[in-house]
Image (cartoon, helix red, strand yellow):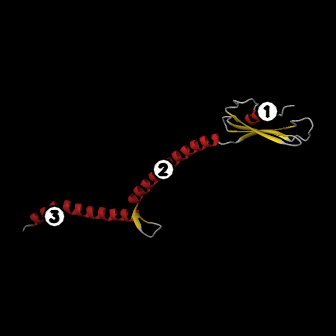
Amino acid sequence: MSTTVIAGLGVAGLPGLIAIVVAIVLWVRLRRVRSAQTVLLPDGSSGNLVDLHATLRGDVQAVEQAIRDLGARFDAFVASSEQEIARCVRINGVVRYDAYGDMGGQQSWSFALLDATGTGSVMTCLHARDHARVYLKDVTHGTSGQRLSPEELAAIAMATGSVADQPA
């Protein structure tokens, strides 16, 4: 073989040789980048940063969904609790007085036990020297189907916030 043929083969093979060297250099750099992306996790295992990021993103989305679900459950619980609390007897008004002129010390009393809508009962106890009588009347939305005494009306008014003082 002549030197021209050898030189021609050398010149023709030079781009291929350069491509092989460049490929080896890029392969080494890629391995360095991948090893730099490897993270030591708290449990002692190692993982790729890209895979770890994808896993963490999925976990964050799951937590966000759980928070939204919890918020919806909390709102439903608040609404049902408000309905239940509104039905509870929680407002009261008490009026003490002397039902009979011969007895002092305001031993007689009327009190109203109502829910948020003004529905419930008014109870009255009239004390005399030799006996006491107790009356219970239903109240619906602040009124009763039975005749109410002024003291009972005052107790209902106190319970509903209409009047704060006892009748004279």
* Viewer-side residue, 102 vs 78: 102
Say which amino acid is labelled 1. Ala
Say which amino acid is labelled 2. Glu
Could you tell me which residue is drawn at 66 percent across and 34 percent down? 117
* Viewer-side residue, 100 vs 17: 100
Instruction: Select label 1 or label 2 by which is in front.
Output: 1
Quadrant position of the N terminus in the picture: bottom left
- Image location (x, y in percent) of residue 39: 43, 65
Instruction: Using residue 134 as the reference point, say whether residue 67 is left or right of it.
Output: left
10 Å crowding of disc 1: few (<14), some (14-19), many (20+): many
Q: Quadrant of residue 160?
A: top right
Say which amino acid is labelled 3. Gly
10 Å crowding of disc 3: few (<14), some (14-19), many (20+): few
10 Å crowding of disc 2: few (<14), some (14-19), many (20+): few
Who comes first in sequence, dot 1 or dot 2?
2
Instruction: Check contact, mark 3 vs mark 2: CB within 8 A.
Output: no
Q: Secondary structure at mark 3?
A: helix
* Viewer-side residue, 85 vs 127: 127
Which disc is residue 167 wearing?
none
The residue identified by callout 1 is 154
Could you tell me which residue is drawn at 61 percent across and 41 percent down? 82
Q: Secondary structure at mark 1?
A: helix
* Viewer-side residue, 1 vs 25: 25
C-alpha distance separating marks 3 and 1: 116 Å
Which disc is residue 10 wearing?
3
C-alpha distance separating marks 1 and 2: 54 Å
The residue identified by callout 2 is 64
Could you tell me which residue is drawn at 50 percent across and 47 percent down? 68
Instruction: Select label 3 or label 2 by which is in front.
Output: 2
Who comes first in sequence, dot 3 or dot 2?
3
Q: Secondary structure at mark 2?
A: helix
Which residue sits furthest bottom? 44
